[in-house]
Image (cartoon, helix red, strand yellow):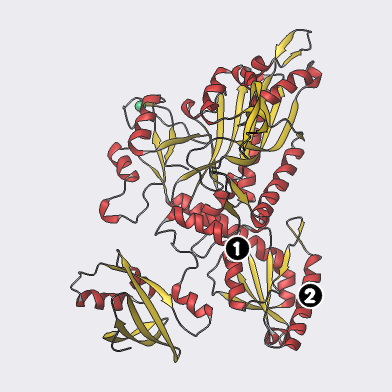
Amino acid sequence: MKSILKKTFSRETKFFGQSHKFVFYVNKKFWLVFFFYKSLFSILLIKKIDNPKLEISRNISPSICNNYKKRKKNSCQEKYLFFFCSKGDNEVERKEKKTAIVPTREEDYPEWYQQVIKVSDLAENSDVRGCMVIKPYGYALWENIQKHLDLKFKETGHKNAYFPLLVPKSFFEKEAEHVSGFAKECAVVTHSRLEDDGKGGLTVGGELTEPLIVRPTSETIIGASFARWVQSYRDLPLLINQWANIVRWEMRTRMFLRTTEFLWQEGHTVHSTKEEAMEETLKMLGVYATFVREYLAIPVIEGEKTPGERFPGALNTYCIEAMMQDKKALQAGTSHFLGQNFSRAAGIKFQNKNGLEEFGWTTSWGVSTRLIGALIMAHSDDNGLIVPPRVAPIHIVFIPIFKSETDRIVVLNYIKQITIALKKIRYHEESLRVEVDERDLTSSEKNWYWIKKGVPIKVEIGMKDIEKDSLFIACRNKQPFEKESISQNFFLANISDILEGIQRSLYEKAFQLQKENSFKIDLQDDFYRFFQVPKQRKNEIPGGFAFSHWCGSELCEQKVKEELKVTIRCIPLEAEKEKGSCLFCGGNSEKRVIFAKAY
Ligand SMILES: [Zn+2]
């Protein structure tokens, strides 16, 4: 070994509150570090790769890195990644590595997001460009979102129906603004069959007389049905919802946030008066806001979109905006007041009480699988996904710990008896969703598997716990090593409260983030500084929500969009009237709007 590796230096340092000795050896590619931990002898192999240098300080100890830098007179150019060759258990390994997700949020937020989806097994990219496969765990999450929302829709008087996936081109052409808004992202069906090309392949045949568009939204096709369903004021209001898939030909896609095909619901309603349609638009916005706050534990701001950001063909678009952990905004749901535009285009007419014919007033509103993207980015950490209990596919997972076959039977029986008791307990009006991990894996592997999947409560049970009639629990909103031994009785009596506590703490944390990164900004210079990253602080994520005055002109809105990639997220519904001057042109402004970078 000595012929390959050159000993550089050794050092005693405090690490995890104890004194440890490190001995550093080096060759061209690796640092090999002998590391003494809890009197166990371990070896660290640190691979040299390009660029930054402080990686080592986070993983080992600042003093070692400084020592190294001093020796190199700060000329150190390498980055050190950690590979642990210890014989100690995986928990120690992770403890040293500190995060289960590489890179961390701070290092590379977009890549961290992709990794969370991967390790938690929510979804994967498919062979079809821009389309994702939602895996069982991700789909279970969507089903929970769907279930609760569906209940809210029904409670507010809506009924579900289903309309065709394919929309005739002529339907789209009826509403000019609508067609121009969606034209660039439509998948179009032009042929109806495949034919043998005589060379062992296939060619398309049966050209359609009228192309069909795969729905990018369903206002026009649903409008055609509504025109048949609505005859008299007695048929109104007509309150319909559809759960469906949508195709929008996106150039840049990202799982759950922007995919060519996605799942959603779209509400479509017809009313006899403008006031009633507007009331419906805002009511459904409220349903979304409450759901996202109470179930997904994400604070949102309700507001109106500027004319430039409206849904194509709508008179007003309202939205809920949330802040993600990188301080960018995410539009989590929209509700549109469509006026009579679509009813004129589709011919939705009714006879009023006086026998006169009128066009109906319509609305549409939707949320999609994007909510899962919002949930991931609002709560997850550097160890993986964190799911709010109210929508979690699994509330509690049990990890049995045993050394022998006899112990295994005892432990599993003990767990079985607890799960039977748990099934009688209701959490937030639902049965508890419990899983026992009996797979042939080490307890450490299982532990990390469930941490990465973000299950709210993880319970370890071994023979020692059974002797004390207790269990060892870890809550996902805390650090992985914060575990607590509690009695079985206490656990059963308080499980609902523990889950609600996690739900609440996630909301509070997200609320705090939004609060700490929201600022009233009144000077243009401050505004530009707020959204730009100083070169010397490359890793810092700039921005947040800037509450600033805007004159209402599209020119000022465009300017910021082009120069900073910052958009007006919304004009908050609760914004107080406050006279001010536009940050960009000095024009009059009546209230503050929210500017942010957005997904
Ligand atoms: Zn202006």
- Answer yes or no: is residue 363 visible: no
Q: Is residue 134 above or below residue 596?
A: below
Looking at the picture, tell me which residue is in the foreground, 69 or 556.
69
Where does residue 227 sit, x and y in percent of width and height? 74, 18
Q: Are marks 2 and 1 in contact (CB under 8 Å)?
A: no
Residue 416, label in figure: 2
**Amino acid at circle 2:** Lys
Q: Secondary structure beneath disc 2?
A: helix
Binning the other alpha carbons within 10 Å of mark 2 as few (below 14), some (14 to 19) or many (20 upward) gives some
How many C-alpha atoms fall within 10 Å of the one at disc 1: few (<14), some, or many (≥20)? many
- Residue 356: quarter of image: top right
Residue found at the very far left of the displayed protein? 73
Query: Which label is found at residue 453?
Result: 1
What residue is drawn where x is 35% and y is 33%?
Answer: 562
Q: Quadrant of the N terminus?
A: bottom left
Question: Residue 189 at what x, y percent from top left?
Answer: 63, 29
Residue found 81% across the figure and 70% down from its top: 420
Determine whether 505 is above or below 567 in the image.
below
Q: Is residue 513 above or below residue 308?
A: below
User: In this view of the protein, which residue sits in the foreground, 211 or 178?
Assistant: 211
